[in-house]
Image (cartoon, helix red, strand yellow):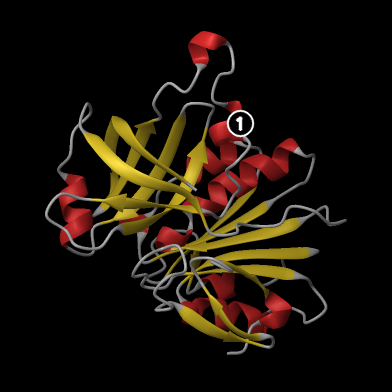
Amino acid sequence: MRNEIVTIQSRRQLAEGIYEMVLQLPDDGAASGSGREGAAAEAIRPGQFINIKLEGQYLRRPISICDWTEDTITIIYKTVGRGTEQMSRMQAGETLDILYPLGNGFNLNGTFSKPLLIGGGVGAPPMYGLCKRLAGMGRKPIVLLGFGSTADVFYEAEFRQLGAEVIITTEDGSRGVKGFVTDGMDGVEYDSLFVCGPERMLQAVDEKAPQDVPGQMSFERRMGCGFGACMGCSCRTKYGSKRICVEGPVLERSEIVW
């Protein structure tokens, strides 16, 4: 875990209340030739998150990592409270205090070749970083994204640019398949499952997917500290309680107790 002051390189609105922010990591030895490869590019795994300290706010804000390069981290967040609303007004050139990378992330090892990646709303961003790395490994990801309406859809083109097959569902039927992400699963062939979204969505996906398909699910939970000290984000598994911020946010499908 690293604690660094990063600079906002860019911020743009993707949809109503949805923002993308690219964070510039500080130079970490580039002049001496060591670069930042070991600090960020190798340390971060898809599904991990950063924890942001904001002026005037007591608790840090955990935000999933969408993508990263040797010297940048991209996050996507929704304005749901004072902290994220404050972030939505920040401009390029301002700085943020972050802890990263946190959580355990997705495990990309395995013999699967046709993974199904499911993201519901702001559960979509970590799927992008995952899709990018899986595609780079020669896998053939299918990406299923669920939104409320056409106005809420974001990053569809970005996923397609990675070469992924993309399925969109909207609750009002204004785009793609009408209904929830589980409705978009009909007729899709896959040999592994990666999911991020609200807990009720995770459970619905788990109940619909064949039980013999291995899967990993990323939980969205309110976190007090973000690194395992407060125990406030614990959840039940077959192996006892696990902290979403440390042992999670990604858990194996087979260990989850609903």
Q: Nearer the viewer, residue 224 or 208?
A: 224
82 on left or right of 74: left
Residue 70 percent coordinates (x, y): 54, 27
Q: Residue furthest right?
A: 111
Residue 147 percent coordinates (x, y): 41, 63
Residue 70 visible in the current orientation: yes
Q: Residue furthest left?
A: 56
What residue is at 48 percent from the left and 66 percent from the top?
A: 245
Residue 197 percent coordinates (x, y): 48, 68
Label 1: few (<14), some (14–19) or many (≥20) C-alpha neighbours in 10 Å: few
Q: Secondary structure at mark 1?
A: helix
Query: Which amino acid is tagged 1?
Result: Gly
233 on left or right of 111: left
Q: Nearer the viewer, residue 154 or 73?
A: 73
Q: Nearer the viewer, residue 162 or 220?
A: 220
What residue is at 23 percent from the left and 28 percent from the top?
A: 92
What residue is at 40 percent from the left and 45 percent from the top?
A: 75
73 on left or right of 209: left
211 on left or right of 63: right
Q: As displayed, is residue 61 above or below residue 19? A: below
What residue is at 22 percent from the left and 26 percent from the top?
A: 93
Quadrant where the C terminus is found in the figure = bottom right
- Residue located beneath label 1 in the image: 38
Q: As displayed, is residue 47 above or below residue 27? A: below
Q: As displayed, is residue 54 above or below residue 198? A: above
Q: How many marks?
A: 1
Residue 189 visible in the current orientation: no
Residue 55 percent coordinates (x, y): 15, 49
